[in-house]
Amino acid sequence: MLNHYHWRGTLEAVCIPIAAIFFSLVLFGIFCALAGADPLGVYASIYKAAFGSWFSFQNTLIRASPLMLTSLCTALPAQLGLMIIGNEGAFVIGGIGAVAVGLAISSAPPTVVQLAMAISGIVCGGLWIGAVGALRYYRAVNETISSLLLNYVAIALLNHLVSGPMRDPSSLNKPSTYPIPALDMLGSIPGTRVHYGLIYGLIACAITYFLMRRTTFGFAARTIGGNIRAARIAGLPVGKLTVAICFLAGSCAGLAGMVEVAAVQGRANESLNANYGYAGILVAFVARHNPLAASLVAVLLGGILASGGILQRLHSLPDATILVFQGLVFLVVLYSESLYGRFRVFQDQSTVRRPPSVPYVPRPTSL
Amino acid sequence: MATEALGWWGVPLGIAAGTLRGSAPFLFVSLGECLTEKSGKINLGLEGTLLMGAMSAYAISYVTQSPWLGVLVAGLAGIVLGSIHAFLSLQPKVNDIAVGIAMIIFGSGVAFFFGKPFIQPVAPQLPALEFGAWSSQPQVQSALEICPLFLIGVAIAPLMQWFFQSTRWGLLIRAVGDSPDAARAMGISIFKIRLLCIITGSFLAGVGGSYLSLFYPGTWTERISGGQGLMAVALVIFARWQPMQCLYASLLFGGAQAIGPALQSVGVTSYYYLFNASPYILTLAIMIVTCSPKRTLRGAPGTLGSSH
């Protein structure tokens, strides 16, 4: 009996998102048809470009790995009941930190440089969002707003550093830092074109899932999220936990910035600000703040992002089509959040205690 | 350029001109956000609305050669996006901030989708009122060319202040934002009030977008907004949910935006980006100083940010 306790709930958590994605595909098909393209052809192209072959699936995975990491920046504080949207800022700061360290010690052995860059990205991103958590706890500054503001500060800092103090004079039309030596770049997983950032992302999702669902630390955090007054009365160190979890959250996004710099771009410039942060927020919400689900949703979104080019080439739709598709998917999936608990089929019969039914006593109808 | 002749006097003049030119989008967006937040919901998606407004105004102005029709259509586009946001964010268990971010993606996607053919052509612009004819300095003349749309925005601010303070509808909106239970007890439909507030707020943001493409900077590109829609949320906090203070805050933010370019014109280029970030740093500093764990922020609608 206990083993079967939650299966209807799990079924609900699988069926509703899938139905939502199908519905958004239908809406997108209508949109494409109105724009004069063949919806079925567009579906086929998106599928082919995202998951159709091993070659294209690798493209999807490359785009998915930063999303896995940035989504944790929203998903972890959500366990505390905090709503942080500073992913973009932590991502950018992590990237800057990684480049600064990578350039400073470029004479060291490559493994040391890579490790130092990763640690620098983790620490910089962690401090960035950790500060948001500290402001929230000690000064009651709304974490959503402060993290949003810090995004702009981070982007301004990036632009300032790459156009001034850290600028490579040879980068003329697009100010950049000096490039990280090719030797120190993160390599690809053997046999693929996918860089090691994917492994970082998968490990981070697995660790945070374990941390949040299977340890006392995670239990304490979820207690705070559930009822902060009860947590205080129980003697939990609310302040420390808040700052620690925000630090962890930021460090994930910072690591994503490091991966972007050390595996893809090779240098820091304005391309670092490529909306991986904002997309990560949506991944976290669609995954309902579950780190394992976030890794799957990240692959899905990575697939959508990877199919941008093909729509332009094959169906002569503008490249913004993929933005419309992304927006539609997320709007419908977010709407589906309100459908949980509305369908009888998914209710656990054992949890619903019906009042004892009154025996049906046939009575002669009086005419 | 022109400011060179004035030397360092060009800096304050440049900032003043930038304030008069650049604060209108901030003003419309923040008034729209203020109205939305007074009813207890946040609309982070105004960035998408702003882009949609800018695109549709430019397109309509180009096709019909009538910029004012463009402004109207931009407002209508705002209403459409606002209705979507309102419908979704008013469902139970749906987070309004997440919907806002999805609306930014959707709104900018639709705007770029339909706006692609209008990047090249030149659309007729909104007229400017020449308030600087008395001056012989061409810089002063160009600084005082003010768009009537900006003056409309300036007029809306005190009107909205009066609306919140002295009308029955204003009271109802404040009641819904502060204490939905009390409002429900009064027999008010919370859903309807919030729906209307979000849609009207979005209308204002759409009109703000038309200012971007039809007056300043006066073209349609995909990078036209630069985060002004997202800023609205911070601006409204800065203004303590008071429409009149939204006006002052918009002027301040518009002015702060002009510091970097004004200094650049006299040769100070090194801290350009940091000056551009000054409004954000200022807002954050003010929040750190004025917030306290012991009390909530003064003026904040009671249910803001909760899932009530």
Image: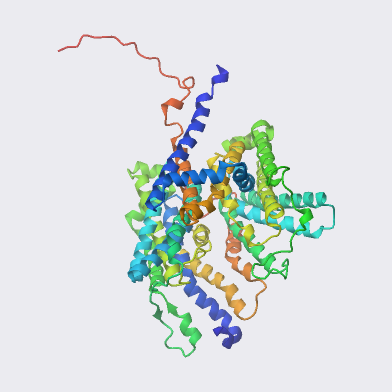
Please provide percent x and percent y for residue B123. Answer: 40, 72
Q: Is residue A40 visible?
A: yes
**Nearer the observer, B125 or A160:** B125
A48 with respect to B159 (left or right): right
* Vertical side of A205 occupied by A144: above or below: below
**Image x and y of residue B78, in percent:** 39, 58
The image quarter containing residue B132 is bottom left
* Residue placed most toward the observer, B275 or B307: B275
Q: Which of A275/B86 is in front?
A: A275
- Whether residue A93 sits left or right of residue B49 in the image: it is right
Count of all numbered marks drawn on residues in the image? 0
Outermost residue, right direction?
A108
Residue B306 appears in the figure: no
Q: Who's the residue at 72% across and 52% down the image?
A: A121
Give left or right: position of B79 versus A75. left
Residue B20 appears left or right of B78: right
